[in-house]
Amino acid sequence: TGAFTYDPGFTSTASCQSKLTYIDGDEGVLLHRGYAIGDLAENSSFMEVAYLLLNGELPNQDELSGFTNTITRHTMVHEQLAAFFRGFRRDAHPMAIMCGVVGALSAFYHDSTDIHDPVQRTIASHRLIAKIPTIAAMAYKYSVGQPFLYPDNSLSYTGNFLRMTFGVPAEAYEVNPAVEKAMDRIFILHADHEQNASTSTVRLAGSSGANPFACIAAGIACLWGPAHGGANEAALNMLREIGTPDRIPEFIARAKDKNDPFRLMGFGHRVYKNYDPRATVMQKTVREVFDALKVNDPLFETALRLEEIALNDEYFVEKKLFPNVDFYSGVILSAIGFPTEMFTVLFALARTVGWVAQWNEMITDPDQKIGRPRQLYTGPTQRAYVPVEKR
Ligand code: CMC
């Protein structure tokens, strides 16, 4: 017993101090180190945002080249890791593979698991950011039965990832610059989002002194759930199920029905009670990708119409439910060629930057303690043990 604040879901608990990301959910504002997400998405690159989150300032040209080169030098994974992949069933969900393989990195890189050594922490951070696209692409290749491709370090971070995913050894792979740009922007939009469930998981795991590879694996496991990173997959599946705009009212009615567990996936957010600023950028990016690839997925029309109907519906207005980052991302990712099972993997890839930055901030925070919430005990009071024959 004891007098503890009861806060299920930590809706009103600040678990740490942080200089990384600021969100004003009522105004729909998201800033990384003071820079608006819209500005970063428009003008920056994922490598630059990674540098910003890790180091606190935007890099100058030399710093950016130096950082990019460092990340590039670590893109290969240990050759034995390929054997590790082959232990998975071919139909394994790629997020299951990600949880396992990223956790296993701690068994491959012993020289960067000492969290008390700042040099080792930096190397682990760089390794995680550099290797996650390689591992993500390998998870995809494994699922489609194609050979793994080694990284090509002459390409950008994102271009390299696209090639490792969609290229095959038999043919030269041309990175489509418009797709590369869109993908890079999607990575920026997912890079960090303060103390969300998976980031809190990474911090909690790290608070016990666990090594960074294990902590990021814990974050990946948490991200997998449909209420968090799994929502992009769930949102596209939902749009496919709805199909044509004439069926929207049926699904809106289900979302409003208290007796039906169905929710509009890609809608609502714990913090945003206004339009998610990432969704604005995402919606714009859909059109750019469609133009570049000369495709037009009718599901985009369904999504736009669904948004319009929901935003004019009393239920959604009252509860302040708006599209979130995941509402439009699925339409883009599927146009680029990713199967839905890969969507959350892409989220994990990008969020690795945020997780790593948050983990570093936590480790160097003088106030840092092991995370150990208390509870309100609601079970029986002390009672006498009854031998089994008397029960
Ligand atoms: N469709 C229908 N009703 C909803 C929805 C929705 N998508 N989201 C929330 N509500 C209702 C909910 O039923 C509840 O109603 P009431 O107050 O009458 O019980 C009210 O709105 C508040 O919802 P909550 O579940 O108490 O709010 P939360 O802050 O715990 O949940 C959420 C936030 C994101 C989990 C939730 O909105 C949700 O499940 N959305 C769908 C999944 C989704 O898109 N997740 C991605 C989030 S953004 C990316 C990320 O963080 O990974």
Image (cartoon, helix red, strand yellow):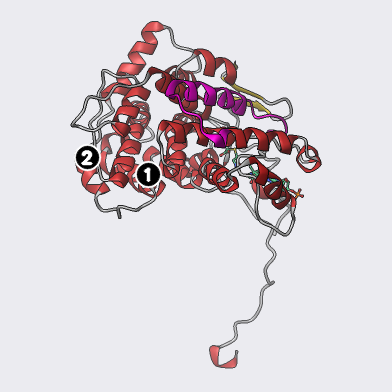
**How far across and down, in percent of the image, does residue 363 sit?**
47, 33
Using the image, tell me which numbered label, if any, was put on residue 98: 1
The answer to whether marks 2 and 1 mark residues whose Cβ atoms lie closer than 8 Å is: no
Q: Quadrant of residue 138?
A: top left
Q: Residues within 10 Å of mark 1 (few under 14, many from 20)?
A: many
Q: Callout 1, which amino acid?
A: Met
Q: Is residue 285 magenta?
A: yes
Q: Is residue 125 visible?
A: yes
- Residue that appears at 37% across and 39% down: 213
Q: Callout 2, which amino acid?
A: Pro
- Residue that appears at 42% across and 34% down: 349
Could you tell me which secondary element the residue under label 1 belongs to? helix
Residue situated furthest top in the rendering: 61
Considering only vertical position in the picture, is 206 above or below 4?
above
Looking at marks 2 and 1 on the same chain, the residue that comes earlier in the sequence is marked by 1
The part of the chain drawn in magenta is 271-300
Q: Nearer the viewer, residue 162 or 13?
A: 162
Residue 385 relative to residue 124: left or right: right
Q: Which residue is mark 2?
A: 147
Q: Nearer the viewer, residue 323 or 112?
A: 323
Residue situated furthest bottom in the rendering: 389
Q: Is residue 235 magenta?
A: no
Q: Quadrant of ligand 1?
A: top right
Considering only vertical position in the picture, is 201 above or below 374?
above
Quarter in which the C terminus is drawn:
bottom right
